[in-house]
Image (cartoon, grey):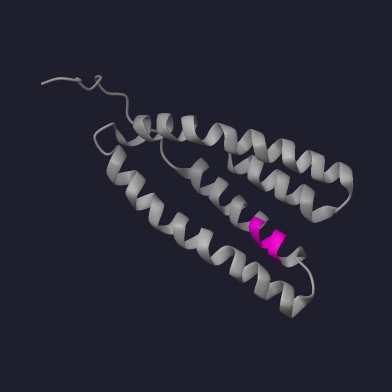
């Protein structure tokens, strides 16, 4: 999914024409529409179902922090530099780093399925 984020932010960064906005909206919708069901499945496979709540809570802190500060930082960059191009390229770089981190995450060991009831 981070690859989609990188792709649509790059598309928007390269041009501000009407067709680029249509491509951006299509890629953005596909990426964010797939995140919720895919995240739950991947997290359960990677960390186990018992740790799902804890991992979700730990992930929520930096996500909320970035969601709160991102628009402020983009606005500041606009005020200082007169445009959003740097903010979009920073997003592209961050998403590329996230994609590399995801690719480098080791696969979980295959183990016996967890029992639902004791």
Q: Quadrant of the N terminus?
A: top right
Above-or-below relation of 22 to 38:
below
Percent coordinates x, y for residue 92 in the rendering: 67, 54
Q: Residue at x 29, y 41 (%)?
A: 53
Q: Residue at x 84, y 45 (%)?
A: 20
The segment highlighted magenta reads: 87-91
Above-or-below relation of 8 to 29:
below
Q: Residue at x 59, y 57 (%)?
A: 94
Query: What secondary structure predominates along the stretch shown in magenta?
Result: helix
Percent coordinates x, y for residue 90 in the rendering: 66, 62
Magenta span contains residue 65:
no
Q: Is residue 55 left or right of residue 82?
A: left
Above-or-below relation of 1 to 37:
below
Q: Quadrant of the C terminus?
A: top left
Percent coordinates x, y for residue 63 in the rendering: 46, 55
Q: Is residue 7 left or right of residue 69?
A: right
């Amino acid at each position: 999914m981070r690859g989609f984020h990188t792709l649509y932010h790059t598309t928007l960064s390269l041009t501000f024409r009407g067709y680029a906005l249509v491509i951006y909206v299509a890629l953005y919708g596909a990426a964010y529409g797939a995140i919720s069901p895919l995240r739950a499945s991947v997290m359960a496979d990677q960390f186990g179902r018992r740790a799902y709540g804890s991992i979700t809570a730990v992930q929520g802190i930096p996500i909320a922090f970035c969601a709160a500060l991102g628009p402020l930082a983009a606005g500041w960059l606009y005020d200082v530099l007169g445009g959003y191009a740097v903010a979009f390229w920073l997003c592209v770089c961050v998403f590329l780093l996230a994609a590399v981190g995801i690719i480098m995450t080791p696969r979980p060991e295959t183990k016996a399925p967890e029992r639902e009831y004791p």
